[in-house]
Image (cartoon, rainbow, N blue to C red):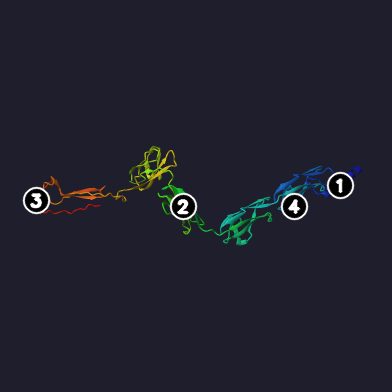
Amino acid sequence: MRGHVRAGCLAVCGVISVACGQGREAGHIQTDAGAPASVELSIDPPSATVESGGSARFAATVTGGSDHEVIWSADAGTIDQGGRYTAPLTAGTFHVVATSRAHPAASATAVVSVASLSVALSPKTVTLLPDGAQQFTALLAGSVDTRVSWAIVEGAAGGSIDRAGTYTAPATAGTYHVVAASIADPRSTDTAVVTVTDPPGVSVSIVPATAAMQPGGSIRLSATVTGATDTRVVWTCDKGRIRQDGLYTAPWTEGTFHITAQSLADPSKIAVAAMNVLKSDVTLPVEPDQVTVEVRGLVVFRAHLPGTLDSEVSWSIQEGDAGGTIDSLGQYIAPGDHEGVYHVVATSRTDPGKSGTATVTVQRFDLIDQGGNVAASTRTFALWWGDPVAFPPTRARFWSPCWSAWTGPPISASRTNTCEGPMRRRPSAAASSIPARRPPRTRPSR
């Protein structure tokens, strides 16, 4: 019996010698001559991958003995006696060991791999104006602690950055470097490059910079101002009309005309657009092509195109309802409450690319209501006044000492008659020699 025990002890010592010579293996059981041959330990899981500063839980199983308690240890990081392991902040491969409390010669080992920590900055490069601001973001991998510290390589001369990663550029142009470092492992860093450039100054551009137009056509232009907080411009043109919202109306003559946008922030900065006004190869003439009409006035337009009837033309007003109305027969009615210059457009139904335009000027002809054209007219009136006995009966059967006053222009004047006394028969010729006292004469007002 003793021979068998001695042989068992020699076998156990041989296992210990091999383990010491080859190193630890995951879940490997270790024992010595003082431990019963039937005591075995195992760790679950036998291996684990943990982030820097992360944790993992291990469990040890003891078989072949009555005491199942173990003592935990680790060569890096920490582990409590409940088997909860906390990895170190540095990357590497480490070992967790469970040892039998009743038989210290019996143990098992698990392998722990701690992932390397990395920091990634976003954005990596940025260009700013002096005193400009930029928000940076740092992303950490391989660590449960995602905090970073911020720094600028060039120090205060390179600007400033707060704890949230908000960077403010310096007032001096140059190239600077923003660094984010992991608090868990300050050796893990990333760097962003900041280029600070002087402002380019105010510049103005127009879109479109050039365009082809029909005579009398319209196009809307837009101006962009950079390098200034005030982006307003003043529009001008050498021919045609342009509103301050950029709507340009070409003249009725052909040619190349220029539109200028001038910066209000820096009047020395301008942009110029060129408009090429050309008649189309095929036009649809409208008759009359220009007309002046009174408010609520009526004009009948006709479109003439070889091979096309008036019924094959669509009529419209370029300014919409504000410019009046026109029916399918070309009968145009001017607006009734305002003046203006409007455009009647005739478009071929068979070929919408063919069109013609007529200009309508709407204005009031009443001098009292903002003026207008006055038609010249001459009229002759016979005015009689004086004592009734001074007029012979042959001139008229009845007479009354009346006079007339005309007010307003001849085409819309009104007459006011003033009489002194009742109508009576003309006096006899004998009384015509008696001098008469003339009442005040009223001149017609114009």
According to the picture, the residue beneath numbered tag 1 turns out to be 14
Mark 3 in CB contact with mark 1 (< 8 angstroms):
no
Amino acid type at mark 2: Ala
**Which residue matches tag 2?**
274
Q: Nearer the viewer, residue 386 or 96?
A: 386
Q: Which mark is residue 431?
A: 3
Q: Is residue 194 left or right of residue 252?
A: right
**For the residues marked 1 and 2, what is the alpha-carbon distance in whole angstroms?**
100 Å
Q: Kindly indicate whether the residue at mark 3 contacts the one at mark 4 (C-beta within 8 angstroms).
A: no
What's the CA distance linking mark 3 and mark 2? 85 Å
Q: Are marks 1 and 4 in contact (CB under 8 Å)?
A: no
Of residue 145 and residue 128, the one placed in the foreground of this image is 128
Mark 4 or mark 3, earlier in chain: 4
The amino acid sitting under disc 1 is: Gly
Tell me if mark 2 has few (under 14), some (14-19) or many (20+) residues whose alpha carbon lies within 10 angstroms of its own: some
Question: Would residue 347 be visible to someone looking at this image?
Answer: yes
Pointer 1 with pointer 2, Cβ within 8 A? no
